[in-house]
Amino acid sequence: MFEAVISLALSRPLVLGSRSPRRIQLLEELGISFRRAVSQVDETQHPGEDPYTCAVRLAGEKAADVAAHSSHGELVIGGDTIVVLGGAILGKPTDRSHAIETLQTLSGKRHTVCTALALADHTRVLCSGEERTEVFFRPVTRVQIEAYVDGGEPMDKAGAYGIQGMGAFLVDRIEGNLDNVVGLPRTLLDSLARDVLHLL
Amino acid sequence: MFEAVISLALSRPLVLGSRSPRRIQLLEELGISFRRAVSQVDETQHPGEDPYTCAVRLAGEKAADVAAHSSHGELVIGGDTIVVLGGAILGKPTDRSHAIETLQTLSGKRHTVCTALALADHTRVLCSGEERTEVFFRPVTRVQIEAYVDGGEPMDKAGAYGIQGMGAFLVDRIEGNLDNVVGLPRTLLDSLARDVLHLL
């Protein structure tokens, strides 16, 4: 399982372009070695750009940015997770009231979580893709939302919640890949790794 | 969020009747204190017993067993997770070939994961319930299954897989509550805790 990622890790040094503890944990579970690095990318959606196209573009830009500062031969995994409601990206909250507003918007509704991944070396983005999962929020009260926001979890997260951790109280059900919701769709990563192995 | 569980933990000492690291982690995330204990219960399904009825009964028996050895005033959380295919429970594998057979049976199909929970004090089971999630396995090869089984993860697990960890490669998608698949449906626990608070 995850044979391609494991083969890739054996043939090239891997770099995970993310500081997300969940992403790190999912990759560590594969028993491979990798180093971590953080990208510096402007995460703004282009005017008129489709949300999923934007996520794939940002994953590629993040991977390329880290790869530009990497050693020759290293392969970089870049990722971008977005929360989409009614065709629009709900970004990371800018402050407390924005986080409350975002969660009130999601309450009682279904939205899409998309994680895009890209693999890059120091010359270019080699391949990329995205995976989507549907998430159904239960109806929650303003008091519950405020307590959750004041707990600090929402502030650095797309859609102002973390599905693992205390944010689980918001979620009635999900439909889709589990890793994807946690933040690193490993079957997508494996399929991208298979493509890259053919390129090397 | 999870207000009832948190209130209950403040009013009574809680005991988690499980040694599952994932269950422990999900409960720890609520920021409550609890001790752990292990139950000694015969996990055999009764002849003709419905799988979900069986899971609820076993969760109750586990909670009651731990509660019988607990201090006065302690409240015990018991849990039982089953994997159901075609109306039958697929149990924990007895050996390597049983694990391989179970995973071959699940390959390419949809099954149900059910976690039942019960709360008990030293006198009786106070309340119980169950939550179900649909899990869709991708088609996997015998070679992949053998590699996974030889990695050691399947041996103590219902249905011979862990959805977190390396077992994620088996799962195409899930439909249902996320905590439930991990092994501790916290929204169900919260609803049971609310019932118990009314009884106390």
Image (spheres, coloured by chain):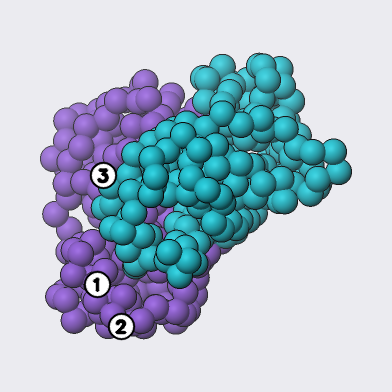
Chain colours: A cyan, B purple
The foreground one among B198 and A117 is A117
Q: Looking at the image, is A140 positioned above or below residue A138? A: above
Same chain shared by disc 2 and disc 1: yes
Earlier in the chain: of badge 3 and badge 1, it is: 3
> Which mark is drawn over residue B142?
2
Tell me where residue B74 sits by quadrant.
top left
> Residue B159 at what x, y percent from top left?
32, 70
Is A58 situated left or right of B174 in this image? Answer: right
* Residue at point 38%, 36% (across, down): A36
> Which mark is drawn over residue B21?
3
> Residue A183 at what x, y percent from top left?
50, 45
* Residue at point 20%, 29% (across, down): B72
> Which mark is drawn over residue B147?
1
Earlier in the chain: of badge 2 and badge 1, it is: 2
Q: Amino acid at mark 2?
A: Arg
Q: Nearer the viewer, mark 3 or mark 1?
A: 1
Q: CA distance from mark 2 to mark 1?
A: 9 Å
> Residue A75 at what x, y percent from top left?
42, 49
Give me the chain letter of mark 1. Answer: B
